[in-house]
Amino acid sequence: MSDKTATLNVDGSSLELPVLPGSVGPEVVDIRKMYGQTGKFTYDPGFTSTASCQSAITYIDGGEGILLHRGYPIDQLAEKANFLEVAYLLLHGDLPKQEELDEFTQTITYHTMVHEQLAQFFRGFRRDAHPMAVMTGVVGALSAFYHDSTDITDPQQRLIASHRLIAKMPTIAAMAYKYSVGQPFVYPQNDLSYTGNFLRMTFSVPAEPYEVNPVIERAMDRIFILHADHEQNASTSTVRLAGSSGANPFACIAAGIACLWGPAHGGANEAALNMLREIGDEKNVKAYVDRAKDKNDPFRLMGFGHRVYKNYDPRAKVMQQTAEEVLKELNISDPVLDVARQLEQIALNDDYFIEKKLYPNVDFYSGIILNAIGFPTEMFTALFALARTTGWVAQWNEMISDPEQKIGRPRQLYVGATQRDYVPVGER
């Protein structure tokens, strides 16, 4: 705790507000007593200058392009760890020892099956339902199937629910895909890795054997790691806000999925891929860049810049390398990647992009990779939700265990009508 304070002058009187340090990053001004002592609120649309909680999970320095999970740089985790190692890290605070990883892996593996009656639940959706609509409904319904892990006051039930969510999300995502294309559901196979199991459940069919391609498996594992958590973003804040009311964990994660569905959040990689397809050929790149620079043209380059990062997104560097590996393995010469490469070089060298700090972000490459592997664009956000569930679960657990946590209740700057008296309808 720091002895530093900030002085706020309001209506001729001053108020001393504590300044709280983090282990790294900006200090924060503690305004919890401000309303009680001054009758004034702060005004911060989008909460861009507000710390809503204390957290020890993820740290971002957008100016320097740094992303740490429990202190570990994201590029090290993506290159050296597997997804379940990162899941354990986010959930428990430290990288697992071998015996801890083995036990955690077995626990997750043996929770991957879903209740058989959930198959009937899927069939209640139209065949053309968006996978995110299906996932929101199915994940929310898990609380109806797993009553024994909804008591949030019981640490053991919270842990079981966390394991179930991490384990069952790949199965649910694969089932959503299978349902949309009219193929039979594929059950999990316990001798496969977390990511390999997901690929098999998604792409195998009963008519022929399926071998998991290790290059594709590693690429998907990296994608999952790179999307596992990202501090207090919109969907994570939604999970925390829902959880602050005491809602069960399945409902909280369903709320996060619904928030992630928005095109400004989880749908950005789909938008970036669609833009690259629209450009179509390297010879068209300059014309589209010129349009992006024209303030009178509504066209915007997708996959560049980030709400937080004002430097090169550290996840994008890993994603670029992964895109090269996948396309080489699949022997794909994709004109979309050629367009992406040229756009990246322009963004890194053109004064307009440098001045505005419009660097390629993680969404710029992820859509190319997922498209090459064979995922339809409507599955992109569902895959994001699959990976981010790990971060949501870790954040939810941290929130529940925080003695300072209260039910979320943002205030407002009211600009509506002042008090009016009711007038009978015939006299209006």
Image: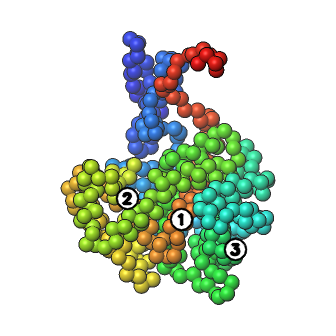
Q: Is residue 159 above or below residue 112?
A: above
Query: Label 2: which residue?
Result: 302
Q: Secondary structure at mark 3?
A: loop
| C-alpha separation, residue under disc 2 versus residue under disc 1 | 17 Å
Q: Secondary structure at mark 2?
A: loop
Q: Amino acid at mark 2?
A: Met
Residue 385 horizontal/vertical position (percent): 56, 59
Pick the front one: 49 or 283? 283
Residue 318 visible here: no
Image quadrant in which you'd find residue 327: bottom left
Query: Label 1: which residue?
Result: 378
| C-alpha separation, residue under disc 3 versus residue under disc 1 | 18 Å
Image point (40%, 28%), residue name: 4
Image point (30%, 65%), residue name: 344
- Do residues under tags 2 and 1 come within 8 Å of each other at their CB atoms? no
Q: Amino acid at mark 1?
A: Glu
- Do residues under tags 3 and 1 come within 8 Å of each other at their CB atoms? no
Residue 386 horizontal/vertical position (percent): 58, 62
| C-alpha separation, residue under disc 3 versus residue under disc 2 | 34 Å
Q: Residues within 10 Å of mark 3 (few under 14, many from 20)?
A: many
Q: Residues within 10 Å of mark 2 (few under 14, many from 20)?
A: many
Q: Amino acid at mark 3?
A: Phe
Query: Label 3: which residue?
Result: 185
